[in-house]
Amino acid sequence: MKDKIVSIAKELLPYIIIVIVVFGIKTYIATPVLVDGSSMSPTLSDKQFLILNRSTKKLNRNDIVVFEHDNSKLIKRIIALPGETIEYKDGILYINDRKYDDKFASITENFDLTNFGIQKLPENFYFLLGDNRNNSIDSRIIGPVNIEKINGKVVFSLYPFNTFGKIEK
């Protein structure tokens, strides 16, 4: 009986290791993400299947990230970094009082951080916007997002196949 148990355990061991490795990769390194809605259009499309890099916490302006808000996962673009000021005025983006190129600025209504009672982004907080500014629940509504709420950076598109490849900023 003992030999039979050892034999079964030896047979199952590779499968157990595979499950642990796959779970570890999905939890800590990379995980699939499905776009739900049009808030990142035209960059991302509804039902587009993406890969999220969960292992990076080095985030830069224009990275596309997934974060948690009200028990949902949202996909948005990083516009401003911790310690920066941000203002949209007359279709122009200003970061730290300097003009900054934002290809969606012309469709963004006037906005600045004083709407939230702050002058600049606190440490570990990011300002995130959807590319479809007229149809996006983003930092203009929910406020700056703490890095602890950010699940990772979108790095690759798998489907539809005409979008296959690295995500361009």
Image (cartoon, rainbow, N blue to C red):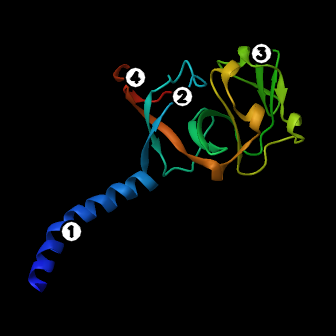
Q: Nearer the viewer, residue 110 or 81?
A: 110
**Whole-percent x, y for residue 12 in the image:** 19, 67
Which of the 4 quarters of the picture holds residue 161?
top left
Distance from disc 1 to disc 3, alpha carbons, whole Å, reads: 60 Å
Residue type at numbered disc 1: Leu
Residue type at numbered disc 2: Lys
Mark 3 falls on what kind of element? loop
Distance from disc 1 to disc 2, alpha carbons, whole Å, reads: 43 Å
- Examine the rendered structure and indicate whether residue 57 appears above or below residue 155: below
Horizontal side of residue 33 vs 98, given as left or right:
left
Residue type at numbered disc 3: Gly
Q: Which residue is mark 1?
A: 13
Residue type at numbered disc 4: Thr
Mark 2 falls on what kind of element? loop
**Whole-percent x, y for residue 103 in the image:** 64, 18
- Examine the rendered structure and indicate whether residue 12 appears above or below residue 27: below
**Whole-percent x, y for residue 70 in the image:** 67, 44
Mark 4 falls on what kind of element? helix
Q: Which residue is mark 2?
A: 169
Distance from disc 2 to disc 3, alpha carbons, whole Å, reads: 20 Å
Q: Are marks 4 and 1 in contact (CB under 8 Å)?
A: no
**Whole-percent x, y for residue 4 in the image:** 10, 79
Q: Which residue is mark 4?
A: 163
Of labels 4 and 2, earlier in sequence is: 4
Of labels 1 and 2, earlier in sequence is: 1
Mark 3 or 4: the one toward you: 4
Of labels 2 and 3, earlier in sequence is: 3
Q: Residues within 10 Å of mark 2 (few under 14, many from 20)?
A: few
Mark 4 or 2: the one toward you: 4
